[in-house]
Image: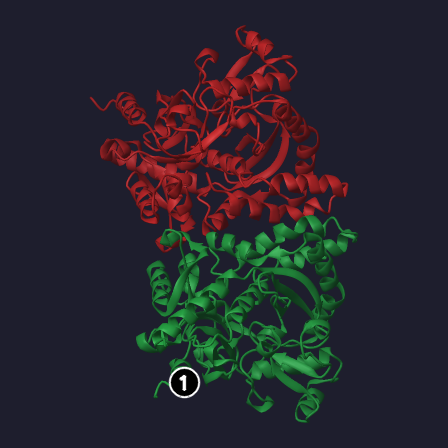
Chain colours: A green, B red
């Protein structure tokens, strides 16, 4: 009979091998209701671990109300509010539907979604198409322009992108991110190069398909004008990698970190679908827009920390020192963060080679035990939204996952695997 | 009366201020004969300092013969060779015609050329449009496909690019390079990000102008398929910066480094148009294609070292550690090269901020005195072509400018400014 330590080591090797062997390919764009499992006309998906309406933070509430208006389920924010106090709607976490969404992460039934498939294990993951800047649901802000943009995305943009992706035969997400890492993207808060590379991979089909030139140019402009466009695609790929590592007996490998703006939750491979929850932290190490301070921000929010769970974003910050300087840090601080993340992870992912570390791979595969033992917390590159005014984004910076999630998970692991016996 | 040291310091400040204040904008594409000063139907321009036909290296000779066939001045390489032994042609350095060209750098009268203007001082500089890979004149290799490509570039590609650039209203070269430096380009051997950024700035006009979609796609593919496309544009901008610093009384600032594959030459601001010459070095610190070694390479060649004269390329190698790894070097070696270049230059160019050096600017403004005093030689990122077989490129790596050029220039400076007196 094997000792638990040995079993954990073997289980984590399997988890890691699965994470690293996925081949995520962007294959389609479709309507959420058509493709997302257990999506219904009355379901609204949100970022983070499960949360009921009244506990949601203000920006998430605004985005949910906006989505209900977009769906035609409510005629105004007041109507939406009333509807939300009935039992007629289902609010459910993206993560329970093979989906992920940045910031508020709201997905409603008629929204178009990215469809990314893992060629290795056959899973599929979903996310919205990134809305860009301005009054946008993902940042918890809503207005007439939000509805107009969402309608255009549904009626014009998504059908074109669907055809374009079909014509490409599928776009390898890791391929783009591997180049992005060479070009100063850490693949969370900075996707400038990756978005350019994505554009490069769709220009030919976009301008070759049977389509008016005006529409093709509109589609091009929308993507080219948003350096975060590739973010949601990255998130689906990371979701696929982590889903491949789920439900492995004895494994202490993290399979999700996610925030709903109220709670921060993590999941662990050997502990199935359970969430281990703590209050979501505020962004103290951040650059705030003029006139704003940490006092104005909502707690950290979004499924985008699936990127750090996969060893990119904050874990790859040495590749994008500008992201450390957001938080007042130097290049050496960026290197130091990436190296620290090496102390709580299982391996280096050679697919993502960091030039300034002599092309060492990104630290990947967070081990709950290592986080608890060392006290080194996963470092997440994130953005801040206003806690109450509906202003949307007010800053960006670095946040640490709460220690409490990890101690809770490790205690549950002890109980589950009978460590006391 | 001021001491010479003080006069030199003041003169170098003026040179530097001029270099740093140019605003190079890509404004047009036109035919060499139409726009390059002193171009004639019988003139062939080449890289490097002046050189007569018989002293040219084999790759440059091949490119010159190819250009004569392209011009219809010769029907075969033999005929070209015979013509070159007469007095009917003028071979002249690009640098004497406000032009620059990478590697062999051949410009013949009917070739289309980039036209880049300096909005600050009103100068204009020229270069060919980059041919890309395969059998190409710039790498000193020639065949049927070379002629076909050059003809297509003249008849199809250039007229489209001309219209596209006109529609953009001009493209700021520094703007693209400043972003490129943030994305892992050192802006000589690596232009992957800059070329993507250039593409991004022309997609809308390219697909908006009155043009068949097939031709627009051909033009797009040609640029998108060549990550060095922006190289020649960078060179024209650097040429403008250095030309702005020319002919300043008392200045010891370098205004050109250039190689013709036989000789390496430098020019100094306070010494007018004189070239200070030494044998061009071989690339020892380079990665050679399988089957090739330094023994197979021609001496270093091309006007592209105008990029290092401006403080990019080898001087900015810390921004592109992959370029140091070509020569077997680590990230620390790349940083060390950039820091060493700081010891022979006058200032840091804040336009080009290197992320891994906490956004310090690139070391710029080479002072001949500092090179002679320290023995630290300008480090140039370069490529190698085969010395005799017509194979074209066989490697890429790092080369140092010859010390002899600098001692000769400093002695001439002493004579010119009567240091002995």
Residue at point 75% right, 41% down? B214
Q: Tell which residue pokes out farthest to the front in this image.
A: A1
Residue at point 66% right, 56% down? A221
Q: Tell which residue pokes out farthest to the left in this image.
A: B421
- Residue A355 located left or right of residue A170: left
- Residue B234 located left or right of residue B325: right
In the rendered image, the vertical position of residue B351 relative to residue B92, given as above or below: below
- Residue B174 located left or right of residue B5: right
In the rendered image, the vertical position of residue B251 relative to residue B177, given as above or below: above
Whether residue A216 is visible here, answered yes or no, is yes
Residue B135 image-quadrant placement:
top right
Q: Residues within 10 Å of mark 1 (few under 14, many from 20)?
A: some
Whether residue A325 is visible here, answered yes or no, is no
In the rendered image, the vertical position of residue B261 relative to residue B248, given as above or below: above
Secondary structure, mark 1, is: helix
Residue A6 image-quadrant placement:
bottom left
The residue at which mark 1 appears reads as A408
In the rendered image, the vertical position of residue A260 relative to residue B52, given as above or below: below
């Amino acid at each position: 009979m094997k000792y638990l330590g040995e079993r954990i080591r073997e289980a984590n090797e399997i988890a890691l091998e699965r994470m690293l062997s996925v081949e995520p390919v962007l294959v389609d764009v479709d309507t959420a209701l058509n493709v997302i499992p257990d999506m219904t006309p009355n379901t609204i998906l949100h970022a983070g671990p499960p949360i009921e309406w009244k506990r949601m933070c203000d920006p998430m509430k605004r985005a949910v109300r906006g989505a209900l208006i977009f769906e035609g389920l409510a005629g105004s924010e007041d109507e939406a509010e009333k509807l939300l106090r009935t039992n007629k709607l289902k609010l459910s976490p993206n993560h329970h539907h093979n989906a992920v969404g940045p910031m508020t992460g709201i997905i409603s039934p008629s929204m178009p979604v990215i469809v990314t498939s893992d060629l290795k294990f056959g899973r599929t993951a979903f996310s919205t198409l990134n809305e860009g800047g301005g009054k946008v649901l993902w940042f918890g802000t809503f207005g007439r322009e939000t509805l107009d943009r969402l309608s255009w995305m549904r009626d014009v943009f998504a059908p074109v992108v669907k055809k374009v992706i079909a014509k490409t035969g599928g776009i390898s997400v890791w391929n783009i991110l591997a180049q992005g890492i060479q070009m100063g993207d850490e693949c969370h808060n900075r996707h400038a190069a990756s978005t350019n590379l994505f554009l490069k991979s769709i220009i030919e089909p976009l301008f070759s398909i049977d389509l008016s030139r005006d529409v093709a140019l509109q589609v091009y402009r929308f993507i080219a004008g948003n350096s975060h466009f590739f973010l949601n695609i990255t998130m689906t790929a990371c979701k696929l990698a982590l889903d491949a590592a789920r439900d492995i007996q004895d494994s202490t490998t993290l399979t999700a970190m996610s925030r709903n703006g109220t709670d921060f939750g993590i999941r662990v491979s050997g502990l199935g679908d359970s969430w281990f929850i703590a209050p979501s932290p505020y962004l103290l190490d951040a650059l705030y827009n003029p006139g704003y301070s940490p006092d104005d921000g909502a707690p950290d929010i979004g499924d985008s920390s699936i990127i750090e769970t996969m060893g990119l974003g904050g874990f790859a910050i040495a590749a994008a020192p500008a992201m450390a300087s957001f938080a007042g840090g130097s290049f050496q601080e960026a290197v130091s963060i990436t190296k620290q993340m090496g102390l709580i992870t299982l391996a280096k992912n050679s697919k993502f080679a960091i030039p300034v570390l002599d092309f060492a791979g990104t630290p990947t595969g967070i081990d709950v035990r290592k986080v608890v033992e060392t006290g080194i917390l996963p470092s997440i590159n994130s953005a801040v939204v206003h806690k109450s005014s509906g202003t949307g984004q007010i800053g960006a910076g670095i946040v640490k996952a709460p220690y409490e999630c990890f101690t809770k998970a490790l205690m549950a692991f002890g109980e589950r695997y009978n460590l006391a016996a």
